[in-house]
Image (cartoon, rainbow, N blue to C red):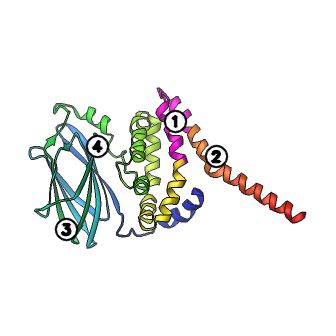
């Protein structure tokens, strides 16, 4: 089933304009106190530039939009900014929805106004739990900027970046895949492919609830196989390759080989009935 979905969805995705429901993925590498933190936005508007002031605990995002109705999500690491946030949109106090866990703050934006907009995000904690004297090498190895992308399809499927299934995918990526060179190479290649079509699928999920349920039904077996990585020790590149190839083969068997076998047997059974 997922093969059919991808066949009809991936091909038009390359030339499809995004609707008002979803949009662009931007990763903002915030450098402060010798560290690099990745702030991520998923929106139907683009980010022109951003500024960060550690003394004021303030992140300023300069937005450019061609739409009147703007929707977006901002993910901020808790150890960069946290606590109780204050927001200003074009210097007017603004009240978006904020959800947080121990790792990230997840901010949902909904505002009107095309053209240029300025969003100020002010926290009351800065570098929470971190020392300010950490060097850049340590910082970049922890955050791995550029590799941590949003799980657009899973987020649209389960309704929130804080959903357990989405957090599970993040933990597998950060704690398993990105701990080995082969895993990093895989994630780089996968992200190039994934972001070429995932915004379009997420858009369809938000627009058509039946399609959303179909995607949920389709990806649940894959999520189950990925949880295997949480219960095994990966201590070398060979371990990563072995488990990775095994999981890929398992998914190929479920999503391609098994349906093909079922179709072939049904055709054979139908042919037999015709002869009889």
Q: Nearer the viewer, mark 3 or mark 2?
A: 2
> Of label 2 and label 1, which has the lower sequence position?
1
SS at badge 1: helix
Q: Is residue 100 above or below residue 70?
A: above
Query: Counting other residues with Cα less than 10 Å from the Cα at mark 4, is it few (<14), some (14-19), or many (20 or more)?
Result: few
> Of label 4 and label 3, which has the lower sequence position?
4
In the rendered structure, the answer to whether residue 272 lies left or right of residue 95 reads: right
Q: Check disc 4 and report the residue beneath it.
A: 101
Q: Residue at x 67, y 50 (%)?
A: 258
Q: How many angstroms separate mark 3 from mark 1 (CA)?
A: 46 Å
Q: How many angstroms separate mark 3 from mark 2 (CA)?
A: 49 Å
Of the pair 6 and 111, the residue shown nearer to us: 111
SS at badge 4: loop
In the rendered structure, the answer to whether residue 63 lies left or right of residue 259 reads: left
**Range drawn in magenta:** 221-244
Q: Check disc 1 and report the residue beneath it.
A: 228
Q: Nearer the viewer, mark 3 or mark 1?
A: 1
> Of label 2 and label 4, which has the lower sequence position?
4
SS at badge 3: strand
- Residue 173 pos. (x, y %): 42, 40
Q: Check disc 2 and report the residue beneath it.
A: 253
Q: Residue at x 26, y 73 (%)?
A: 68
Q: Is residue 216 above or below residue 176?
A: below
Q: How many angstroms separate mark 2 from mark 1 (CA)?
A: 16 Å
Q: How many angstroms separate mark 2 from mark 4 (CA)?
A: 36 Å
> Of label 3 and label 1, which has the lower sequence position?
3
| Residue 236: in magenta span | yes
Q: Is residue 135 above or below residue 74?
A: above
């Amino acid at each position: 089933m997922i093969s059919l979905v991808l066949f009809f969805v991936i091909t038009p995705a390359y030339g499809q304009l995004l609707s008002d429901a979803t949009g662009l993925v931007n990763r903002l590498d915030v450098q402060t106190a010798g560290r690099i933190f990745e702030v991520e936005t998923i929106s139907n508007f683009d980010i022109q530039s951003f500024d960060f002031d550690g003394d004021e605990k303030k992140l300023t995002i300069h937005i450019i939009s061609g739409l009147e109705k703007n929707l977006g999500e901002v993910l901020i690491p808790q150890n960069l900014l946290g606590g109780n946030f204050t927001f200003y949109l074009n210097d007017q106090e603004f009240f978006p929805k904020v959800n947080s866990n121990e790792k990230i703050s997840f901010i949902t934006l909904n505002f009107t106004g095309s053209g240029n907009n300025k969003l100020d995000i002010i926290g009351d904690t800065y570098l929470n739990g971190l020392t300010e004297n950490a060097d850049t090498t340590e910082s970049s190895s922890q955050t791995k900027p550029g590799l941590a992308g949003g799980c657009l399809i899973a987020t649209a499927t389960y309704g929130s970046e804080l959903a357990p299934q989405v957090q599970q995918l993040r933990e597998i990526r950060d704690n398993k895949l990105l701990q080995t060179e082969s895993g990093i190479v895989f994630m780089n290649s996968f992200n190039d492919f994934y972001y070429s079509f995932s915004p379009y699928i997420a858009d369809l999920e938000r627009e058509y609830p039946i399609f959303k349920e179909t995607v949920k039904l389709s990806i649940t077996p894959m999520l189950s196989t990925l949880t295997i990585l949480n219960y095994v020790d990966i201590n070398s590149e060979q371990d990563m390759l072995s488990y990775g190839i095994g999981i890929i083969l398992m998914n190929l068997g479920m999503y391609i080989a098994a349906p093909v076998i079922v179709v072939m047997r049904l055709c054979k059974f139908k042919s037999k009935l015709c002869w009889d």
